């Protein structure tokens, strides 16, 4: 049940066979190639003599005591194969051994009957030259003695039972990857944020995870570019975060995003209204400078300009920055426009969206040439330099980008299955939230968010936005207790990265780099700074409790990341399987044919759609193909599937 590359998690098992002693590596490889020829479903890339599988102490082992080794089986197969390749002629030198093998297999399968004896004689007639009748009888009598011993062995199955259609031996089906995910630890949030997220969850009837995770990103949006946090002398992180929430349609994702961003929108509108005059004056001043530049160029061409005057105006124009209206975040944007938004925003901006269209754009749906560098560097703060034909060059020295997205599962599935995204580390940069749906249990009459609670949230967001962006971001540091706690967390995590988290090594490798910024965000959000009276505010220091809260939030995102990385690759198939199972149980089917499913499931209409679903359900033990005899006349009947009775013993 592990995800490998882009393939979804699926049940796998190892089969061990006893073989004779083979000491020559080349002979062993040749032997394994024969085995793979007989059983082509075995891994063709594991045929060399150097392969060795370590045992798994937790595996469920089933032992079946067979009657022969794999070496003996292959030898028999080779004998039969040789017979098949000789145009059904048994030549001299192989007559006795081949007939002995055929007699034993025939009498075991069909019993000591006249029918079996006649089948054996048909094979004996293929000997060239013919064997003496006495020798043929001796071979059959030997097989009869062998058969008497076989019938006395424990576990013997009679020919009647062996040749009759068999009912499957049902076991409990393997559950689809259903994770019991933890709820967001809201107690780890600052009080004002905690009260608002809980009230918002009640008001919108959504899981508290949605509002809590969104609040982390909103606070990061307010602080990015203004603060950095130091874990140790050689480790400093910016405070921007990438957060993606995954929920089905009708989960009220937009309602949560709208409520979380309401103070941002109000602050942005008020700021731009108050400063509209200065924005226009800035544009006018730029135009005046450009006209002066044009005039001086004309004078310089005529030799009427004083020395140094042209350099002075050129320097003034180059250094002048037009004041643009405040834009705290964007929604639908291309990578080229995002570079410009970062440049216009002083090196910082954010993407906040209740849809996942940005992933479609990144995947190249709208253009084949998509550059994801801005997303990679915007997360880590690496310098962005953009030089394109026909456009001014842009240099962003310390970019800070925050992302908050709420997407549907199929959007995240596309993200996870994109080899470029994961190969270059984009998927490892996101914090994933997969809240448990409460659809079906939501109340109509809910408690609205009180004015006091909203006012507290609004005041905090405004307080964070009022922080001045200095030339150098303010540095948040750790107390000795917080430093020790973070050190313990990192040292405990490191040896587990390639064992406990083998499937998400890339993501867990960045976990400490996410916990540290979260600690800085919680630290700043826990205080309310006065921007009117304090010219030199006290330094921000993360205490032990704040670091403990940041680690608990990091652990929450870890569990959700495990689910996101392992489930999303198989989401579409799992969804279809659950749909078919619901139709089977709803109609009380105990057996069915493929056409029955196509008739009952409106969204599945073709064989190409339904057969992979049936195969998946069979692999997981929910259904099994029914063994049926075929007379050999006419067209074989369509495959019938039996339903595991466990589905009706515990339908939930």
Image (tube, grey):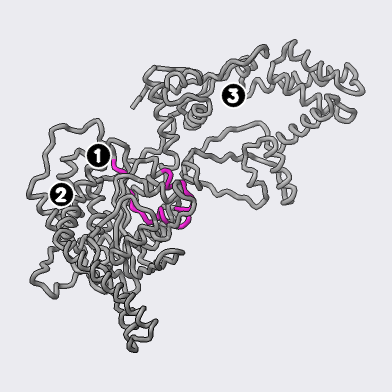
What residue is shown at x 39% (from left), y 45% (from top)?
Answer: 412
Q: Nearer the viewer, mark 2 or mark 3?
A: 2
Label 2 close to label 3 by CB (< 8 Å):
no
x then y, percent, for residue 519:
25, 62
Q: Earlier in the sequence, mark 3 or mark 1?
A: 3
**Whole-number angstrom distance, CA of label 2 to CA of label 1:** 17 Å
> Image check: 56 left or right of 219?
right
> Exactly how many numbered labels are in the figure?
3
What residue is shown at x 68% (from left), y 33% (from top)?
Answer: 68
Residues drawn in magenta = 413-435
**Residue on which disc 2 sits:** 196
x then y, percent, for residue 181:
31, 43
Q: Say which element carries label 3.
A: loop
**Residue on which disc 3 sits:** 155
Query: Residue extending furthest front?
Result: 302
Q: Quadrant of residue 159?
A: top right
**Residue on which disc 1 sits:** 252
Q: Earlier in the sequence, mark 2 or mark 3?
A: 3
Label 2 close to label 1 by CB (< 8 Å):
no
Tell me if residue 150 is in the magenta stretch: no
Of residues 255 and 271, which is closer to you in this image?
A: 271
**Whole-number angstrom distance, CA of label 2 to CA of label 3:** 67 Å
> Image check: 311 left or right of 14?
left
Query: Residue extending furthest top?
Result: 114
Tell me if residue 426 is in the magenta stretch: yes
Query: Residue extending furthest bottom?
Result: 307
- Asked whether residue 213 appears in the rendered view, the answer is yes
> Image check: 143 left or right of 210?
right
For label 1, the crowd category at 10 Å Cα-Cα, with few meaning under 14, some 14 to 19 and many 20 or more, is: some
**Whole-number angstrom distance, CA of label 3 to CA of label 1:** 60 Å
């Amino acid at each position: 049940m592990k995800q490998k590359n882009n393939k979804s998690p699926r049940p796998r098992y190892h089969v061990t066979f006893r073989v004779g002693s083979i000491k020559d590596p080349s002979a062993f490889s040749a032997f394994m190639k024969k085995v793979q020829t007989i059983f082509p479903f075995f891994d063709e890339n594991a045929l060399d003599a150097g392969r060795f599988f370590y045992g798994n102490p937790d595996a469920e082992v089933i032992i079946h005591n067979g009657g022969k080794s794999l070496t003996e089986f292959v030898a028999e197969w080779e004998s039969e194969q040789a017979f098949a390749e000789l145009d059904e002629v048994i030549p001299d030198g192989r007559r006795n051994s081949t007939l002995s093998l055929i007699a034993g297999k025939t009498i075991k399968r069909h019993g000591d009957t006249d029918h079996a004896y006649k089948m054996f004689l048909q094979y004996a007639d293929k000997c060239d030259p013919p064997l003496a009748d006495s020798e043929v009888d001796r071979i059959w009598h030997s097989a009869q003695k062998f058969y008497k011993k076989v019938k006395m062995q424990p576990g013997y199955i009679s020919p009647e039972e062996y040749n009759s259609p068999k009912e499957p031996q049902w076991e409990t089906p393997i559950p689809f990857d259903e994770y019991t995910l933890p709820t967001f630890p809201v107690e780890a949030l600052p009080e004002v944020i905690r009260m608002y997220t809980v009230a918002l969850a009640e008001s919108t009837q959504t899981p508290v995870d949605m509002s809590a995770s969104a609040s982390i990103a909103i606070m990061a949006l307010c602080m990015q570019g203004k603060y950095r946090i130091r874990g140790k002398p050689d480790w400093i992180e910016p405070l921007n975060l990438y957060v993606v929430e995954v929920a089905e349609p009708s989960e009220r994702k937009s309602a949560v995003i709208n409520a979380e961003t309401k103070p941002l929108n109000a602050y942005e509108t008020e700021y731009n209204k108050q400063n509209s005059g200065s924005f226009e004056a800035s544009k006018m001043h730029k135009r005046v400078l450009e006209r002066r530049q044009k005039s001086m160029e004309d004078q310089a061409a005529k030799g009427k300009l004083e020395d140094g005057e042209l350099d002075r105006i050129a320097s003034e124009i180059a250094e002048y920055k037009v004041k643009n209206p405040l834009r705290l975040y964007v929604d639908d944007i291309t990578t080229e426009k995002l570079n410009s938004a970062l440049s216009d925003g002083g090196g910082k901006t954010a993407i906040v969206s209740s849809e996942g269209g940005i992933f479609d754009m990144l995947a190249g749906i709208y253009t084949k040439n998509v550059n994801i560098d801005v997303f990679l560097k915007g997360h880590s703060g690496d310098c962005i330099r953009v030089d394109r034909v026909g456009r001014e060059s842009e240099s962003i020295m310390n970019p800070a980008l925050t992302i908050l997205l709420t997407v549907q599962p199929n959007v995240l599935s596309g993200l996870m299955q994109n080899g470029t995204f994961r190969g270059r580390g984009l998927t490892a940069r996101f914090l994933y939230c997969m809240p448990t749906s409460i659809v079906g249990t939501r109340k109509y009459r809910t408690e609205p968010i009180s004015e006091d609670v909203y006012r507290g949230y609004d005041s905090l967001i405004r307080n964070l936005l009022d922080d001045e962006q200095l030339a150098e971001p303010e540095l948040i540091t750790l107390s000795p207790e917080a430093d020790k706690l973070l050190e313990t967390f990192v040292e405990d995590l490191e040896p587990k990265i390639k064992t406990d988290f083998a499937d998400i090594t890339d993501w867990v490798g960045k976990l400490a780099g996410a916990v540290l910024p979260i600690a800085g965000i919680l630290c700043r959000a826990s205080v309310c700074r006065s921007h009117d009276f304090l010219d030199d505010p006290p330094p921000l220091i993360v205490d032990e409790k704040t670091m403990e809260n940041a680690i608990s939030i990091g652990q929450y995102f870890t569990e959700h990341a495990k689910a996101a990385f392992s489930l999303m690759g198989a989401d579409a198939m799992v969804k279809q399987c659950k749909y078919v199972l619901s139709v089977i149980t709803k109609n009380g089917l105990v057996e069915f044919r493929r056409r029955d499913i196509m008739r009952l499931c409106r969204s599945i209409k073709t064989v190409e759609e339904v057969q992979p679903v049936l195969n998946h359900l069979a692999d997981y033990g929910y259904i099994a193909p029914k063994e049926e005899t075929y007379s050999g006349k006419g067209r074989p009947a369509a495959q019938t599937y039996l339903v595991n009775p466990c589905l009706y013993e515990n339908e939930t």
